[in-house]
Image: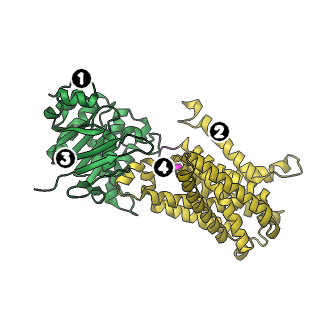
Chain colours: A yellow, B green
Amino acid sequence: MLEEFLQIDLPAILVAVLASIACALLGSFLVLRKQALMGDALSHVVLPGIAVGFLLSGHINPLYMMGGALLACFASVLLINFIKTFGRIEPGAAMGIVFTAMFALGIVLLETQVGSRVHLDAQHALYGALELTYWQDPGNLSEMPHQITTLGVLTILIVIFIALFFKELKLTSFDPILASTMNVKVSWLGAALMTLVAMAAVASFEAAGSILVIAMFICPAATARMFCDSLETQLYVSALVGASCGLLGYILAAFAPLWLGFEHSLSAAGMIALTAGFLQLLAMLFAPKYGVLSR
Amino acid sequence: MPPPPLDVKNLSVHYHLQDEPALSAIDYRAEAGKLTAIIGPNGAGKSTFLKAVMGLIPSTSEKIEAFGKPVATQKDKIAYMPQRSSVDWDFPVSALDVATMGLYGKIGLLRPVRKKHKDEARGYLDQVGMADYADRQIGQLSGGQQQRVFLARTLAQNPSLYFMDEPLAGVDIATEKIIISILEQLKKDGKTILVVHHDLQSVGSFFDNALLLNKVKISEGPVKKVLTPSNLSIAYKSPVIANVG
């Protein structure tokens, strides 16, 4: 029983919690910069890149996946500009075309090419495969599932990035116009942030899948907005809410159905997203200062 | 003679997909140590002028120089105070946070905000009568108080040339008095200040010079010389009476 927990549940919980924290920290900036849909868009765009990463490496290799995903993002930016210039349509429409087309390309690649070579089908790519995280010999760090390593490194990277550029992120998020009159490299910082978002979307991909990852970006950050009057607390609270969603969501998916007498557990990614949405609802209703009931 | 604080030659702005230019062929030279109002009807291109000079929107020109060098290289000598409506006041920052942002250029990249910076910023909040509200989230301030926090941030940048976009729009009397007295003080300190201003009635009592725009430059110089009935009727396409003090 304990061994099963350590082999299956603990690594899955670690992946869920780390992915939630990484996404929540970046999500706070997405929400405050009114770019929440960028998180959504990027998580869709990276899919063909991930698939190509699989094809090239022949197995699940985080570096290939990240590389492929960033290339896919880059290609999307070029495509959007191309369509904007020659398609006689507004930017929003150009983005709509590119994001859905890239996502669809990713699904086709997964279904026709990748599925036969590595153990990954479109279903898992879309909705996550947290249940497949497996640590044969818990405690043996050399055998630690690669998802934990990837997410651990990425989360540390994100924390360092935010700490180093905290005041620039604050300024460019609050008042990008002032920032650009002060010689702050607004577009570089924005590009760095989006690169991290794309990387987080890839790293969380196995935990949440490329559809539900948007909930991890947005919900904890939005929940934290209901409680916080400073950017510092916003970041701490969103990370805390994210971690709670990961932990609670996994428990509700893996254990709660069994405690209630059902035979099968539920989709962990789905339950995490549902928990995140539920916490957001509670916050909107009951938050002390900004909640509906206390206004 | 030292180069002028601002020297603009043949500045035009053409917004995408619009037939008529928002501004065409503007020549303008700011007079050092003066308080200048940029005036004109709605849509005349007053804010556009400042934004184009700061390089915030694309424009064409023969020259945009501050103190004899291209504006892009002089950003540490210039502060631009945007319209209050340009930011999200629900953003999780305090009045002190916003005032401190004016010091970021001085603090420099990769260096954290320290207590001495916050103390300095608190001093600027004090100048605009907002020291008691330093720790308030900015959304909980009135419009006039928000404008004063913006002014404190601009003061913290400690520039030689100020661009202010509608600092007096929609503010209460107390705020207007504070802003005007600070503008006067800055002028005494030898700073050059350009202010987009909407209220023709008060131009004469607050400002030395005026720049009258409506897509093109109609007139510039001392307020009395600019606000003549004929200039105003060209700018506003109808007779306007202004108080030229």
Do marks 1 and 2 share a subunit?
A: no
Is-magenta flag for residue A233? yes
Under mark 1, the amino acid is Pro
- A259 relative position to B7: left or right: right
**Same subunit, tags 1 and 4:** no
> Which mark is in front, 3 or 4?
3
Q: CA distance from mark 2 to mark 3?
A: 55 Å
Q: Gap in Å between the C-alphas at discs 3 and 1?
A: 28 Å
**Quick one: A237 or A102, which is closer to the camera?**
A102
Q: Which residue is mark 2?
A: A281
- Give the residues in magenta: A228-235
**Please, what secondary structure does the residue beneath circle 3 have?**
loop
Q: Chain of mark 4?
A: A
Amino acid at dot 2 = Leu
Q: Chain of mark 2?
A: A
- Callout 1: SS: loop
- Residue placed farthest to the left in the image? B1
Residue B168: percent from the left, percent from the top? 29, 34
Q: CB of mark 1 within 8 Å of CB of mark 2?
A: no
